[in-house]
Image (spheres, rainbow, N blue to C red):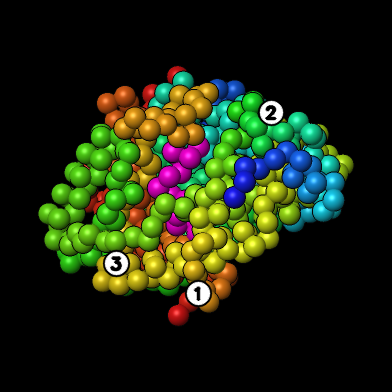
Amino acid sequence: MSTQLAFASIGELAGRLRRGELSAASLVQCYADRIATLNPTSKAFISLDIDRARATAESLTIGPADSLLKGIPYACKDLFDVKGMVTSGGSRVLADNVAEHDADAVTQMNRAGAIFIGKNNLHEFAYGATGENTLYGTPPNPYDQSRLAGGSSSGSAAALGYGLCAAALGTDTGGSVRAPAALCGLVGFKPTFGRISTEGVIPYSWSLDHVGTLTRSAADTALLFNALASKVQTPAAVKLEGLRIGIPEGFFFERADTEILDSIDRLMNFLRGTGAKLIPVTMPSMEHSRTVSLTVQMPEALSYHNRYLEQRGALYSQDFRAGLALGQCLLAEQYIRAKRFIESYRRDMDRAFDGIDLLLTPATPAIAPKIGTVEVTVDGKAEPAGNAITRYTSFFNMTGHPAITLPCGMHSEGLPIAAQFVGKHFGDEELIATATLIESSYDFKITLPDIK
Amino acid sequence: MKRLQQQTLLGIRDQLGSYAWDDAEISELVDPQLGIITGFQELLDQLELLRKVDLGSIPPAADISSK
């Protein structure tokens, strides 16, 4: 029973809560018991708020008119402020940083009736996609504990992957929600830039940061988005027949694991079979996109962390300090030029979206790397593991388009494979609705991890 | 463009108003030995290529507005 509940979607849980088959208090207890058993392995949570969650759950009455999130336990990456709790950023630097207010996203979740249970581990201050954390440990992948869950929202992905909560909030600056979700067999979503408030979230790079969600289904993503975003519209009825899906040429299908490409091929065949139109799309040049992103990220990160460096500089990890030092040594014109390139990418992408409704790419070029992997080699070319994990996701942080990653198969090595769909600016509702339709139509079901 | 010298970065640190990075950290940017961070010279080389691209009057990216 515990396992069945722990891996149920929000939709299933909400139904049971409404029918009186399950109480919110027993659901909180189910996750609390699993966290007590599995957190030492999963390293998913940095801090917990179980007593308050129990009290909240016991006070709830859930009726048919209530939000489907009412009584649903969720967690957030430890960059989000929760009043009265430490927001550590996964770092020694902020070990005493007690929040005075809830982050906007936490307020919105709580307002919808969701129950906060704890804060998730992460790559220190979101600097890195491997999720490695020397202080709190590195969350392992639920499908293979010798491999990474991915990051930087590593604990959020592990929390869902190990069945420790029903949904989680993360942040995505280059793929830090979508990539770990993809590697762990979950659904990861980042909205159009700015559609979910980042107020009360420790920034990494203001120009690229998005608050995003990790869930078990696209249908669950819709529930969270409705609670988190402003001015949510009911999407027009979506159907796959006639849907124009852009398939980018080049970059997004190069240097990728052949089994991942095969899975995306099967998905494309399914979509063709439904009457969707797959249309080749020429994308902006990606040649320098990582350079552009890094040139914006590091000075912005330095600008924020400058407030702590003088007094607490020695408490940062060595690799983050090195990144901040790099940010110090870039020129102002290089930063401004990078931001002009981002504007250029946005304009090119707007043109690319003429004549299509959404884009389809693989979510990652590789399955979850082994913990400790420095470089990933695909097609004979090596690249740093973190760069590989986010190679297909980071561009859309610069352009600000909404994007969702969905599981679409299993690799022969027993790890999940995922696809990424990208929508038009402010087309979040249609993107999520289309993803929900695809997941309900296509055999996306992947086996659950065998958690010992 | 000449290859980056450690002295240049030490000058930035000491003369342009910067956090007091350790000499070893500055050295690592110029001549990576520990594998903590690599590719700063490569990044600068790529930025030099980008400097030569004419972006016309395209402004820096700002917020995205709904149409």
Kind of element beneath mark 2: loop
Nearest the camera: A103 or A277? Answer: A277
Location of the C terminus of chain A (image quadrant): top left
Whether residue A155 appears in this view of the structure is no
Residue depth check, mark 3 versus mark 1: number of the one nearer the observer: 1
Q: Residue at x 19, y 54 (%)?
A: A271
Q: Is residue A123 magenta?
A: no
Judged left or right of residue A177, residue A284 is: left
Q: Residue furthest front?
A: B2
Q: Which residue is mark 2?
A: A135
Residue B56, numbered circle:
1
Question: Which chain contains the residue that carries disc 3?
Answer: A
Residue A445, relative to residue A437: is it above or below? Answer: above
Residue A357, numbered circle:
3
Q: Which residues are magenta?
A: A386-398
Kind of element beneath mark 3: loop
Q: Earlier in the sequence, mark 3 or mark 2?
A: 2
Amino acid type for the residue under numbered disc 2: Leu
Amino acid type for the residue under numbered disc 3: Asp
Whether residue B61 appears in this view of the structure is yes
